Image (cartoon, coloured by chain):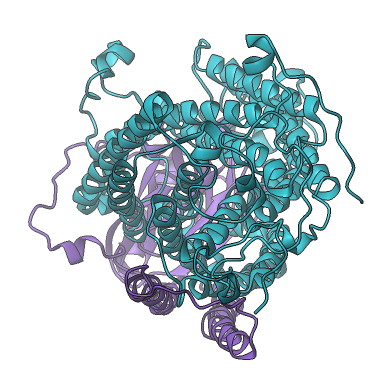
Amino acid sequence: MIFFDSAHAATTNIELPQDMAMWDRIQAPVDISANGHLIMSLFNYTTGMVIFFFILVCIGLFGFSYFYSEKRNKKAYYTYGNKGSHKKVGLIFGMAVFVLIDMAITVQSNNDLVNTFFNFPKGKDVVRVQIMAQQWLWKFRYPGEDNVFNTDDDIVTINDLRLPIDKKVVVQMTSKDVIHSFYLPNVHQKRDAMPGRLSRMWFELKKTGEYDIACAEMCGTHHYIMKAKLTVYTQEEYSNWLNRANNIALAESDPEDLDRYWGWKWEE
Amino acid sequence: MAFYEQHIHAKPKTFLSKYVFSFDHKVIGKQFLWYGIFFLGVGGIMALMIRWALAFPGVAFPVFGSFLFPETGGVIPPDTYASLFTLHGTIMIFYAITPILIGCFGNFCIPLMIGARDMAFPSANMLSFWLAFVSGAVLLASLFTPLGGAAGGWTSYPTLSTLIGSPGVGQTLWTLAIFILGVSSTMGAINYITTVITLRAPGMGYFDMPLTVWGLWLTAILNAIFLPVLGAGCLLLIFDRVFGTHFFLAGAAATSGTGDPILFQHVFWIFGHPEVYILILPAWGIVSDLLSFFSRKPAFGAKATALSMTAITILSTLVYGHHMFTTSMSPLLTQTFMTLTMTISIPSTVFFFNWLGTIWRGSIRFHSPMLFSLGVVFVFGLGGLTGLHLGTVTTDLYLHDTYFVVGHFHYTMAASVLLGGFAGIYFWMPKMFGVMMNETLAKVHFWITMVGLNGVFFGMLILGYGGMHRRLYNPFWYEFLQKLIPINTFVTWSAILMGFAQFFFLWNFIYSLIKGKKAKDNPWEVGTLEWTIPSPAPHYNFDSIPVVKCGPHELGNPALGEEKDFQYQTEELAKV
């Protein structure tokens, strides 16, 4: 059974957010995930360091331009910049950048990757979804009651992903035609969906509501309308919806329809 | 290798042999300049059309919109939009920046600055330009094919760029054009490398070369190594499109075989990451020299600058994987590429420090080339530092393919290279054409460009942080992007301002060519070899090959006395 939310597909009546402070406008999308703050805190640290070092550059650039213009400084200081003191100051700056930015963010990012983003959860409690991207829509597949993918009782939706709150979700994705990218702005992550390959991503949602899912990789003329809806339910709502969807899926399953079986065996 | 005397051809007599099929490196340099400026204009108009569509979706493009898109009443249609950003990227990178920075300055400056009469291989040099010309013609022709020009982004990832995603012949022609341009640039690169190695004037060691030549030489080395890789990728793509092979087809898209679209990404970025340094290295070289010339003191740590540029050249070949963090590469590769990418900031810090060290305690003359060079320090500071966000895997998972990336690479590749290119044009104009450009107009050009440019590219960084992803025909289709409408409008107005500023340049450039003030032989009072000869540079440059006795940045030496604060490279180093 395919659910097609027609009301969602036709969101053309844009209501512009009019009275919004500029500061609120330039914020990143609201974080609804358990681990998005890791990405944002690293972003903020890097930005802080970038601002600090850019201010240093500007002090040099504008300060020297002001104090050492031809008018104020008639005679230039003749040096090749190869004195011991010159090299020492240069070395200090180089080390400061290396330690404060490079080492700090590389180590932090590496830890986040190893402990969180590349550390895929396993077990019965994990919600599993398969995603098939194609020009220009997203298909989602839930394993159904038997918990096995690509069987008759699978729930298949188009452009409509519904997930429970506070559960770890693992998605596996591939593409039917060109490369797409599964982009969850509110989770602050994206992953490419590529033909002939499986890629995967995991996250845990912490806020109920409706959010946008986008395709972030150029995939043709209508790349910009390749949008899906993410609905985050409470666990109770989710199991209600899942039950309903299961029944419909079983009732309307048509074994003759080979197009239905685009799923694959789940790869742990 | 030692220096050798070059063969001198007779002075060309006919118009055709003098201005069209010329062997003279100076004429070929100017041909590349005109070619680059033409495509800069084309790419710039495309950029404005893209920005128009983003800020005012559904509104007809002003002035000639209804002429270009009569079916939609002047509104840019989505397929044209995709074609526009594809060709904007392609044209700006391969047909505007490459010809101006590498084709023009490489050809013009290398022989003059190292004291040679011409390139090592003059006819390969001519062929290089005319192949670039053919390539440009093929690219423009691709726009007029039945299904329109290429529309897969300048990266042209398969399977979108194969018949699955773009069936038209436009994409094939695009790929062919890039291949031909690759041949042309490789030819030029071999020529530059050979020239620098074999034709340096007697007495000129590698560290006596101006840093401009260093930048151009390192660029040529990267070009010679990595353009063939891109060429191979393009050929395989053409095979997939025309001969039905399956190099880049997989999954449901392939009928059989073991192709892989990600293979193209590897091939593309092995070339593509060095490419960004190919574009920026000449600008770095020019800026390093000009900062020293106009501060009237030697380049601070010139040897360290040259060596850190070399270090970046080497590192740039090892970091390409950071363009592919979201493709679910092996975690080991991801972490390796992240760590390697981060190490680039060490040599970058060194030459930033040296740039600031150069103007420190100088006696700065704010002529237009200097203003543009200082502008490069500013915009490249922003561009380079924002690269840190993107080299980090976790933040890149969010920022990848958003406008943050667009802002970052425009700051590094577009803003820095453009300003560096303008600095070079204002600086070498006297030697190229024998005329001075108007300083007031040049300064107006600089300040308006700076305001517009920062509005555009900083706006893009903000849009990217707000989550807006790239290559969207209408970003406001998404609810979470609707709050960004005013920022998009702001970016577009800044882009229009930046485009407007270029008319000051165009007017200045053309007016000085026709009626400009005649230039002195050495108007900027610097000592590198090209300023020892008359302006404009005469046929075969040097009557007798100069003998180099000191470095390129001998300015402000207290031993020189009162009347002159610089010395030519042909003079013995003054000692107290």
Looking at the image, can residue B330 be seen? Answer: no
- Residue B495 in picture, x, y percent from top left: 30, 42
Q: How many marks?
A: 0
Could you say which is closer to the camera, residue B13 or residue B301?
B13
Quadrant hosting residue B497: top left
Residue A60 relative to residue A104: left or right: left
Q: Check the image and name the residue furthest to the left.
A: A19
Q: Colour of chain B?
A: cyan
**Chain letter, purple:** A
Residue B548's place in the image compared with B574, above or below, is above
Q: Residue at x 60, y 89 (%)?
A: A88
Image quadrant in which the N terminus of chain A is located:
top left
Could you say which is closer to the camera, residue B358 or residue A149?
B358
- Residue A60 in picture, x, y percent from top left: 41, 76
Residue B450 relative to residue A219: left or right: left
Could you say which is closer to the camera, residue A34 or residue A124?
A34
Q: Check the image and name the residue furthest to the right.
A: B1
Looking at the image, can residue B53 be seen? Answer: yes
Residue B366's place in the image compared with B352, above or below, is above
Q: Residue at x 38, y 35 (%)?
A: B47
Quadrant hosting residue A200: bottom right
Residue B354 relative to residue A1: left or right: right
Residue B376 relative to residue A17: left or right: right
- Residue B347 in picture, x, y percent from top left: 63, 71
Image quadrant in which the C terminus of chain A is located:
bottom right
Residue B485's place in the image compared with B328, above or below, is above
Could you say which is closer to the camera, residue B17 or residue A48?
B17
- Residue B172 in picture, x, y percent from top left: 64, 21
